[in-house]
Image: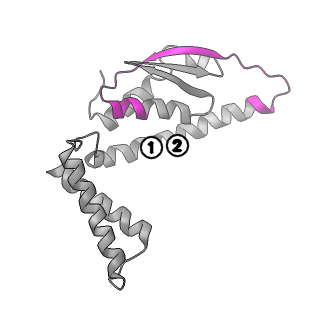
Amino acid sequence: MGYFLGLLVVLVALWLGLSGEYTLTKPAIASLGTVSIILTTVLAYRFDILDREGSPYGRLPQLVAYWAWLIVEIFKANWTVIKACLRSNLDINPALVKVKTGCESDLARTVFANSITLTPGTVSVEVEGDKILVHALYEDTAGPGAFDEMDRRSREACDGKGPA
């Protein structure tokens, strides 16, 4: 029931934010919004997709903390890529590496793989089970343990689990 109410609250906030209708002066628009929100929540309930992955609003504080940490990491990686681009000789050493993840849920694996791709100089190429194929500009920065901190933080934020 908590996931149902969480989805309902988020949909109402999203509709209010996107529609800009905060008064009931236009009842047709308000009634269409109400019908669409009710229909969406009822269908989500009937399709049995209301779970921690389908509506991860209970983990919002952990996810916000993770994204704040990730933004700092993105800026650090940007600096490395900018320095590489401004050098007169291109000294990159690209590599493809397989990264093992401890993330258990699809949400956590998706957040981890997308975080790798968001970080300049690395791209998630393929996710297969608990392994992610990563293309990196520098082989030494993609070595063993290079993504352990990101994996741990995404696992804690999405799965709610500490070190594996």
Question: Where residue 7 sits in the image (x, y, percent)?
Answer: 26, 54
Which SS class for mark 1? helix
Residue found at x 61% / y 22%: 136
Residue most toward the left? 1
> Residue 110: within the magenta?
yes
Which SS class for mark 2? helix
Residue corresponding to mark 2: 71
Image quadrant of residue 131?
top left
Residue most toward the bottom? 25
Report the front residue among 99 and 76.
99
Residue found at x 28% / y 29%: 162
> On screen, 106 above or below 1?
above
Would you say 96 lies left or right of 151 here?
right
> On screen, 137 above or below 62?
above
Question: Where residue 164 sits in the image (x, y, percent)?
Answer: 29, 21
Question: Where residue 29 sits in the image (x, y, percent)?
Answer: 36, 75
Would you say 9 lies left or right of 138 here?
left
Residue corresponding to mark 1: 67
Find the magenta span and give its range. Answer: 84-111
What distance separates the C-alpha of mark 2 from that of mark 1? Answer: 6 Å
